[in-house]
Image (cartoon, helix red, strand yellow):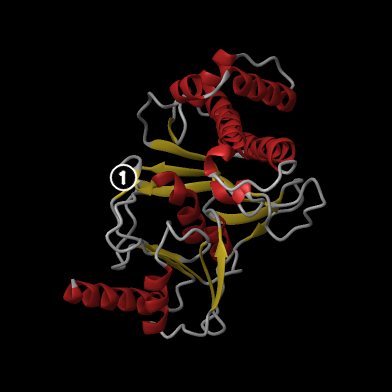
Amino acid sequence: MNLDPIKEAVRQALTLCRKVQIKSIMSLNKISTDKQYSEPVTIADYGAQALIGRALAQHFPDDAVLSEEAGSQFLALTSDSQKAEIISLLTHILDVNVLQSDIVRWLDAGSDKTSDRTWIIDPIDGTKGFINMRHYAVGIGIIEKGQVAGAIMGTPLYDDDPEDENFGALFYIENGKAYRQPLDNREAQVLRVSDRSENVRVVQSFEKKHASKSRMANVREKAGLTDAHIENLDSMVKYAMVAAGDADVYMRLPNLNSTRPHMVWDHAPGVALVLAAGGMATDVDGSPLDFSHGETLPNKGMLISNGKFHDKLVAATQKLLEEEAANA
């Protein structure tokens, strides 16, 4: 399977996102309410997904696609000026005349199909990070017969020079191996999870709503990882860091009694990368993550690691759940 056209679409999506940031966010004074952020995020979401949907329709027309945005939402939720700006951005990046009907068609590409292979699109993962010039990612996962089988992830702030227009990295899976490549197409490097069992580096969600930091701290204590270095980050870049050996553990334990679902597009690309790089990605009881249920995962949480102490993480999480049940 030739992923080059889809990788190029992710690069184009990152270019669009950066243009939106420069025009609509970097020039703004500090804003305190999420509502005021809706315009740049909406423009970037729809624009990025349209670019990826266009590439999939051209190169994998028979495959199913599951994506976060839809053509009907684009028509109903964007103003005339927003539609015009998205059209202008896409026309400039693609160097073709883009119509509103094209955008609707690209956003809905593959959504009416059933296939053994499904592409999962998250046009911008880490909305708050995108808004605040922190980490965000453009992610694509590939599901085959209910199992994660591939991924492409663009991460624009992955430890390269932000003054370079090609800064950031592209992560992907090819022939069963995970790779990292600079955005300017320089040579890709094969990824392998770390072999660290000491001086452990843990990554976790920046946003408190996404996971319970107190519960995860409790698990780390029970697993003997109290001295671990903790880094808070937005987006699925946390998965990429574990796959690349730049981090060793990523846990996602929801807040107690949370009903927030685990959306498939938030996790499919990252889980695929970690597994291809030799790491482990399981539910909190050590069972596999289940990607066969459409938009959501039925799992209770995620334990992601380099595998060196995964059993300890599972045991510690089960102990926490037993204590919480006893105190309920």
Q: Is residue 226 above or below residue 134?
A: below
Left or right of 316 in this view: 117: right
Image point 28% across, 51% down: which residue?
Answer: 298
Hey, which quadrant is residue 247 in on the image? bottom right
Q: Nearer the viewer, residue 19 or 59?
A: 19
Hey, which quadrant is residue 88 in on the image? top right
Left or right of 311 in this view: 278: right
Residue 236 picture location, percent across and down:
52, 54
The C terminus, quarter of image: bottom left
Image point 24% across, 73% down: which residue?
Answer: 324
* Residue carrying label 1: 292
Q: For the image shown, how many numbered marks are present on the structure?
A: 1
Residue 286 picture location, percent across and down:
31, 68
Q: Is residue 117 above or below residue 84?
A: below
Q: Amino acid at mark 1?
A: Ser
Image point 33% across, 45% down: which residue?
Answer: 296
Image point 67% across, 48% down: which residue?
Answer: 30
Q: Is residue 178 above or below residue 36?
A: below
Q: Nearer the viewer, residue 25 or 190?
A: 25
Residue 113 visible? The answer is yes
* SS at circle 1: loop
Residue 173 visible? The answer is no
- Residue at the right extreme? 163
Residue 312 picture location, percent across and down:
37, 80
Q: Residues within 10 Å of mark 1 (few under 14, many from 20)?
A: some
Residue 117 picture location, percent across and down:
41, 37
The N terminus, quarter of image: top right
